Image (cartoon, grey):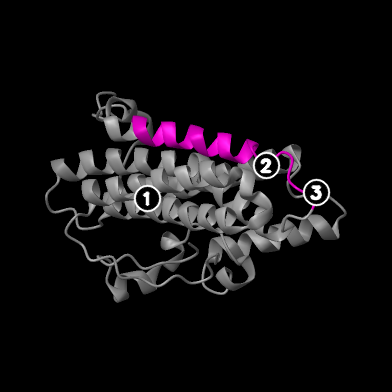
Amino acid sequence: MGIIRPPWISREWFAQGPFNYCDHFGNKLLLATVCKICDDELKRDMLYKKAGKNPNDWNNVFKDVVESLAKVRKMLEKDAKRLGIDLSNLPDDYDEGPEPESYPIYRLIRKYGDRVEKIIKMFEAVPIDADEKLIKKALEALSHSRYYICAKIARTLNSRYEEQKDPEDDLFDSKTSAFFAFIAIERNLRALLALAKHKPLDSLREKLLRFAKISLEMADLIRLEFFPDNKLEYREFGGVEF
């Protein structure tokens, strides 16, 4: 996906924070020219590599997460103080709404994610004449979607619950989160079709096409549930092509 301005987001609002509409998956060098988060990620990787360290090593990741959370906490405390909010005396009866698992659409999405994992495992061994670049690119897209879509639909449902309590909410968080899940599944569809067309993978063609059909149905389900009246015209920046 890369960066996309959802149809319901104004150009003015989008320009204030394009990183809010980036899934950080695609051409990172290109995305980093617009998205601060992608830029920070590239700089982080560069620092570790210059030091001869693996940026993806669990110890390094954990250290950075701890430091990041500490920064967020300081920012939160600073804003709370400015707004006169006592963080140590917040009410315990906040209504968080139903658990995502209570919604049928979330359970379907979770099952879809499980099937994505099964498709990925089909490629533990591939024909020697298969296009490695195509397979790698497709598997990266599928892997990215595995838990991403579950998280996005969970956020969608939670946000929609909050929005229903506040009719004046105009951030469209629920629709945008659902849109990102929709795009990820649509990208899976394109990846699956590309794999199905690849002759060395003929033995997997039927399974790939079957799951492509399921992906199409899931994307349409999300569209009908969360933004049925919107015309989905959008442009991708820095996304992955198949």
Q: Amino acid at mark 3?
A: Asn
Indicate which label's residue lies in the foreground, 3 or 2: 2
User: What mark, if any, has residue 123 been given in the picture?
Assistant: 2
Q: How many marks are shown on the rendered structure?
A: 3
Q: For the stretch drawn in magenta, what is the main secondary structure? A: helix
**Residue identifier under label 1:** 216
Give the magenta part as a residue range: 107-128
Looking at this view, is 121 or 17 the one in front?
121
Left-right relation of 140 to 51? left
- The quadrant where residue 235 appears: bottom left
**Residue identifier under label 3:** 54
| Earlier-in-chain disc, 1 versus 2 | 2
Left-right relation of 59 to 176? right
Looking at this view, is 103 or 46 the one in front?
103
Q: Percent position (x, y) of residue 67?
A: 63, 44
Residue at left offset 40%, top offset 47%? 213
In the rendered image, residue 116 lying in the magenta stretch gets the answer yes
Depicted 43 relative to depicted 85: above or below: below
Residue 81 appears in the rendering: no
Secondary structure of residue under mark 1: helix
